[in-house]
Image (cartoon, coloured by chain):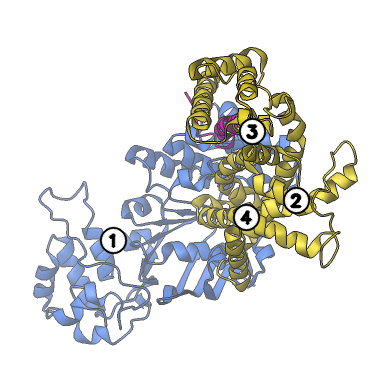
Amino acid sequence: MTRYIVRRLLWGVVVLVVVLALLFVLFRILPTADPAKLRAGRLQNPKIIAEIRHDLGLDKPLPAQFWIYLKGIVLHFNLGYSYYSNAPVTELIFNRLPATISLVLGGAVVWLFAGLSVGIISARRAGSKLDRAAMGTALVLVSAPEYWLGLLALFFFASDIGKVRIFPGAGSYVGLTAEPAKWFTSLIMPWLVVAAGTAAIYARLIRGSLIETMGEDYIRTARAKGLSERRVVLRHGLRAAINPIVTVLGVDIAVLLGSSILVETVFDVPGIGRLNYVAITHSDFPIVQGTVLFASMFVIVANIVVDIAYAFLDPRVRYS
Amino acid sequence: MSAPGDEPLLRVEDLHVEFPTEDGVVHAVDGVTYQVRRGRTLGIVGESGSGKTVSSLTTLGLTRTQGARVSGRIMFDGRDLVTLSDQQLRAVRGNEVAMIFQDPLSSLHPLFRVGSQLVEAIRAHRHVSKAAARGRAVELLGLVGIPDPQRRVHEYPHEFSGGMRQRAMIAMALANEPKLLIADEPTTALDVTVQAQILALLQRLQRELGMAIVIITHDLGVVAEMADDIAVMYAGRIVETASAKALFDGPEHPYTWGLLKSIPRLSGAREEQLVPIPGAPPSLIHRPSGCHFHPRCPYAQPDHARIDPRLQPVADEPSHHVACLLDDAVRRRLWAELRNGATPEQARASVGLPAPDLESAQAPA
């Protein structure tokens, strides 16, 4: 098991280096705005631009630039500096992480809870009107774009512009440690919106998985033991049906940690996605590289965690 | 009132179980009557789809969740299980009546330790501490002959061999010392040598614990080994029922003959031909008219496609019942021929029966 984990981690590092190299090449070879020119602003004279280019290290050959960048990451965990504010990228990302983590983990709680409850009820009443209504709603939520749901939520329920002013609207986010109550209320709508699509997918997933599991022989055994139906479904059925959910849960959380751009933008939550979005529009390569590096890291780690979790969830799974 | 010893432990009367489906109503069990005496063994024999499993699952109320329509009576120890509420029935399941199934690997939960599944079975009906239940689980595993139960109680089903898994299933079924154990094809998924061990185990446990057993099987060898009484089922009905001795000495139903003639006997002559029963079990949605067996019966007569035979006592044998339209005397002559190695055609000829109408033999009406 330990050997397996170490091997997976080493492979993860390889994948990260490849991702970095691809990004590096992508942003420097593809036609894009010249960061030096952008940074020069109105002082578009060649000498200043050349100076800026030199300061940013952009006049060195590409392999050298990449080497310096890699060295900075490995030796100092330094992801470089923003072309604009000169702020260290690592610091920018760490400043933005709490908001993104709040959004994604809170959202995950919502989508897990909603997805599981709806999925279980639908599975137990498969074919009923309730089941059909739930699965119809799920289809709508899966198809609805996040930003559209977000805008609808703001339009109807935001405390500043909404029709029914219930929840704090866009830009109301505050840190958890600053004002816990306000942190919570400001995230209610973003949580619901970020969770909607995933909850719908989970509901369908759990429904299918549970219906299949409830046909297994060991469910008949559980009933033959004289257990209550509740225990048969929730302990014996769900325990087996939940495994596929765990697989997608880890990866879903990881992906969202790196890419909740739309929801963060609509609700103006100052997270990684928002940081990335602004950086892309300004050709601020170091930040884009940094955020994408983080996103890839989340996905790689999540995959390993999911595989390890699987060995605990299913005793038949053994890694060697 | 008769003494409790006289009253059978389980008396199933005119049991009907139907499943409404999109293709029509499946008549899985159609007017079945049988009884199981205390401490004795009833063998229910039949092909797949003859209703033997459904009738037993219904005894435990396990077909309720599948939307079955059940009528008739299932008298168990003075109560009619058909009329019990789900909750009352749950108190009977796994407690007074326990069941083991064909495939022990798929019947045990793959993600729970064997011990915890045993503990759960005990604690479903008894208010004992987890530690006490765990001690009892170890004891039960020992009782069913699992070596080193202290250690194996912590293992998962996939770490057990096939025979050990079935032993664990049996241990689980015995957790609350049931009065009745229903064993649904308990040896079918096992190696032949292991089959014999499991049957011997069931017999030993029956002696020690005094429980009654219903053993469901398609294997006449198994019932010959185990059963005191036998019921032969075909297409949702019992076509013949008798004591094991009477049934093997003088089987009365052509279907029973077919079953007996289609298994090899060690004592039989080497050149003795095995005679399979032609055709396949009928659809339980569109059942044949008249005697349900007539399309496959080598001795069927024209009116057998119209008349539905009732289960009736055989002449001179009040406890031997058969549902067959052939005359008692004709049947006995046929069996005498068959027992002496005649093929069904030869037996029919020597008794002077006309060959069955091929048209009605082809297609169920």
Badge 1 element: helix
Quadrant the C terminus of chain B occupies: bottom left
As drawn, A312 above or below B265: above
Name the residue rendered at 47%, 46% in the picture: B106
Chain letter for blue?
B
Tell which subunit mark 4 falls on.
A
Residue found at x 80% / y 62%: A157
Q: How many neighbours does mark 1 have within 10 angstroms: few (below 14), some (14-19), or many (20 or more)?
A: few
Chain that bears disc 2: A
Residue drawn at (53%, 56%) of the image: A208
Residue under pointer 4: A197
Circles 4 and 1 on the same chain: no
The image quadrant of residue A273 is top right
**Chain A: colour as depicted:** yellow
The earlier-in-sequence mark between 2 and 3 is 3
Q: Which residues are magenta?
A: A293-320
Tag in front: 2 or 3: 3
| Image coordinates for residue A233, horizontal then vertical, percent | 62, 54
Q: Which residue is mark 1?
A: B249
Instruction: Decide which of tag 4 and tag 2 comes sooner along the chain.
Output: 4
Q: Is residue B343 left or right of residue B323?
A: left
Tag 2 residue: A267
Element assignment for label 2: loop
